[in-house]
Amino acid sequence: MKKVLSVIGALALPLALPLAGCAMSPAGDMAGVTASEPTEPLPVVGAEVLFWDDATRSARFRSMETFFPGQEVAPPATARVLPEGESLPAQVQAAIRGYMDSQNAAGVMVLQDGKVRFVDYGLGFGPDDRWTSFSVAKSFTSTLLGAALKDGFIASLNDPVSQYIPGLKGSAYDDVTVEQLATMTSGVKWNEDYSDPNSDVAKMFNVTPEPGQDQVVEYMKTLPREAPAGEKWVYKTGETNLIGVLVENAVGETLAEYAKRKIVDPAGFAHPLFWQTDLSGRSVGGCCLSAALSDYARVGQFALEGGKGMVPDRWFMEAGYPQVDFGNGYGYGYQWWTYPGGTFGAQGIFGQSITILPENRAVIAIVSNWPRATGSEFSAERAKLLAAIGAAL
């Protein structure tokens, strides 16, 4: 049922940073998934990514595996073919390329009926390169939550979170359900301000866990409650990280390993996926995976087509529905943003997005290096572009 709640930050673009440390490799590999160690490791990173200069961002966004540890997920033996479709009208192509120039986009791909109606690249980025996702990863994590439900590892979205994360027992998450975690309506207090070095999101990964402790859980269990569960929406990257812990505990694999079977192979990726890990060796659920532009588009197509049996029936209809209603057609589902007209999408700072237009049977994938992490002017320009593309389909 759609919920109209007290909403904090509903109109802000979601922020998620590569916050994981690099002192530990993933715990174990599986077929098609291998540990990835950085060749130029950076120290634990908080809000510093916001202050990388333009050239540094452009270089690092395409090679996060150089600086952070994670797992590399091989594509299937046979990629999903994205055949060439009818080109978009010349004026729309010109508008897209104008947007790319003015908004520092590294790539735009438009699919309709699974066919490529437009694709182009910039900033020295190309079809065989990867670009970081930031919070687009949240929608991948949501999809793996759906897969765990389908596979029976999670019994119900109404289950208490502490059933799957025992370390949260006795914390403010005691009476929070899996669904409330997925919709960011836990009522647990959180500060997502990246300009504040004392914010929760900046401090979340700055503490090294003791042996046997979970880095994410050790921080999240200290948070106080500010509202009854289910009554207030606040954007919290930490809670998506908790979804990652929950899924990994339930399934017994890292998100990257589970994604191999539940997203990468069935969606037909053409290139390897990289997913960063934290100090506990867990995939970072709230951000930090890298993929090729065409594979972001393939994930959108996978969601548009219902998930190929990997998730429960109607999962993407529910995940892409405004479970929390912000008004004027905007809202938040299960780690997907929802927009007017039944469209929904994944978003990440600095201009990353996958937008799904069910009525048009279309997907629009964009990767970028905006001058700043967020800004209403950047979001407005992207909205104008998406509307123009949608009108031409």
Image (spheres, rainbow, N blue to C red):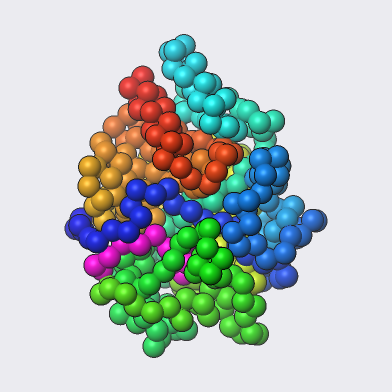
Front residue of 259/161: it is: 161
In this rendering, position of residue 329 left or right of residue 242: left
Q: Could you tell me which residue is drawn at 42 percent across and 48 percent down?
A: 13
Please report the bounds of the magenta region as a residue range: 230-243
Residue 345 image position (x, y, % from top left): 39, 43
Q: Is residue 79 above or below residue 48?
A: above
Residue 368 image position (x, y, % from top left): 56, 37
Q: Is residue 194 above or below residue 106?
A: below
Front residue of 193/38: it is: 193
How many numbered markers are drawn? 0
Residue 327 image position (x, y, % from top left): 22, 47
Q: Residue furthest top?
A: 90
Q: Could you tell me which residue is drawn at 65 percent across and 78 percent down?
A: 208
Q: Residue furthest right?
A: 39
Residue 54 image position (x, y, % from top left): 66, 40
For residue 278, say whether it is visible. Answer: yes
The answer to if 342 sits in the magenta stretch is: no
Front residue of 12/364: it is: 12
In this rendering, position of residue 166 left or right of residue 6: right
The image quarter containing residue 393 is: top left
In this rendering, position of residue 84 left or right of residue 25: left
Q: Could you tell me which residue is drawn at 43 percent across and 78 percent down?
A: 223
Q: Is residue 180 above or below residue 211?
A: above
The image quarter containing residue 165 is: bottom left
Front residue of 55/18: it is: 55
Q: Could you tell me which residue is drawn at 36 percent across and 19 percent down?
A: 392
Q: Residue furthest bottom?
A: 170
- Quarter placement of the N terminus: bottom left
